[in-house]
Image (cartoon, coloured by chain):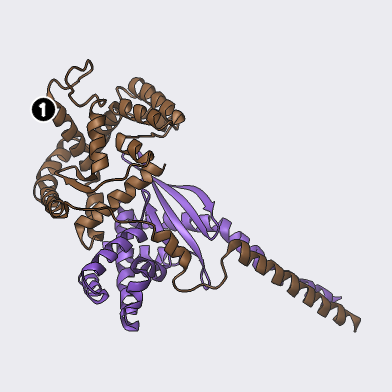
Amino acid sequence: MRQLILGLFFITSLLLPSSVVALEKQELKQSLSSAIDSVMAIVSDANMSKDEKRVKVYQSIDPLFDFAKMAKLSLGKRGYKSLTKEQQKEYIELFTTKIKSSYADKIELYSDEKIMMGELKKMKKRIHISTYVDKSGEKKEIIYKYYYSKDRGWVIYDVDVLGVSIVKTYRLQFANELKKGSAHELLAKLRAK
Amino acid sequence: MYIRVILSLLFIATFYTYAVAASDLNSSDAAVGIEDEFDDEFDDEFEEYSEISDPLEGFNRSMTTFNDKLFDVVLEPVVFKGYRAIVSKPVRSSISNFYSNLYYPVSFVNNLLQLKFKEASDETIRFIVNTTFGIGGLFDPARNGLGIEPSVEDFGQTLGHYGVGSGFAIVLPLFGPTNVRDLGGSFVDFYIDPIFFVNLREYNIAQNQYEGWGAVTYKQLNRFSLYDQEYKSMRKDALDLYPYLRDSYELYRDRQIEE
């Protein structure tokens, strides 16, 4: 009898992963919302220095974003493959630093405003979660775009600010730079920034 | 003994169920399948944009530099600083609201031209409510009380809605990036916009062309004073400021036209 009960436990535990995935989608919104809340709390905390704030903001957003993916998508296949392995690694690090500080800059602009959660849209292979911020009496939309990563589950690969995709603007910028010079020179430019 | 047999059968059954459930998930949620570093689906998502033509690039670049210098040397340290000291942020927001409210005829006409009747009637309700309860448009009770969001449309968007492309990029002093379609569109909008002076029109607020241009410039400066930090943060993202602003403008307009 005890074996049977143990067996049932085992069965339940086997069935669990599928419900976890379903749950994940519901909790995605919750996790984004609480990450935004904690970022806003950090940003408007008067007792922390700017650098301390940065470190804490990065800690809260790190688990949500796939910065390496953003970096690769922004450079595009051809540009990325023209770099050596070491350069690729350096590029991803440079891009990640840049995008994180850019995100923190933008969030700081809205430290006095309230961010509201919008709807979660489920597409074939993507999930978009809308958020809204009121700025000078106007509603601004920021959309977080998720894809399913093999090892990390649903993670953010792009953010739309007022309908403008961050990855897209970087892609256009990098394409511009690559027209003028090599990926190597682009790297140097990013390093200097 | 037979309990063990039952148990192992159960094991097999659950494994099977789980495998089916998992493969189901794979196909419907798409997620776990094979994934190359560079998914083609991602390419589809990001490669649709074709760059705007830019015969005036040289001029546009200089104008962007001019605007940027204007911002750093004149606007930010002198104009905005002084303006902010005299006019508080809520007041500047109200001034911006006031101008937005006066834009109603333009927005109404362009919504109609795009057959957006719901939006046209929303804009009308907003205008009536904000002009009366919002004290001449200084406040936005239509949005804050009734939850009616603005649906602003201009003639550039109307043209875009009917498939007119942007033409080429133009950068204006102070007003920044635009394109042939949108610049042409604003001249059409000026004929309707009450803040602008148009000969032979009954409802001119401005007494002459200069006052009309003055009102338009003040509208822009007031708005810019509310969004100067945004400009600074955008500027930091740019590797090369001109194409960055140009492309961001195009993407932003594309999105507005789509809506």
Place of residue B257 in the rendered image (x, y in percent of width and height, measured from the top left): 37, 42
| Marked residue chain, label 1 | B
Q: Which chain is brown?
A: B
User: What is the three-letter code of the residue carrying label 1?
Assistant: Tyr
Q: Residue at x 39, y 28 (%)?
A: B112
Q: Which residue is mark 1?
A: B210
Quadrant of the frame with the N terminus of chain B: bottom right
Position of residue B199 relative to residue A76, above or below, is: above
Residue B14 in the figure: left or right of residue B198: right
Q: Picture quarter containing residue B130?
A: top left
Residue A149 in the figure: left or right of residue A60: right
Image mark count: 1
Place of residue A167 in the rendered image (x, y in percent of width and height, measured from the top left): 36, 61
Look at the image and tell me whether residue A46 can be seen.
Answer: no
- Mark 1 Cα-neighbour bin, 10 Å: few <14, some 14–19, many ≥20: few
Residue B188 in the figure: left or right of residue B213: right
Place of residue A95 in the rendered image (x, y in percent of width and height, measured from the top left): 31, 69
Position of residue A64 relative to residue B179, above or below, is: below
Q: Picture quarter containing residue A1?
A: bottom right
Position of residue B145 relative to residue A185, above or below, is: above
Which hue is chain A drawn in? purple
Q: Residue at x 20, y 71 (%)?
A: A192
A12 or B182, which lies in front? Answer: B182
A193 or B111, which lies in front? Answer: B111
A117 or B124, which lies in front? Answer: B124
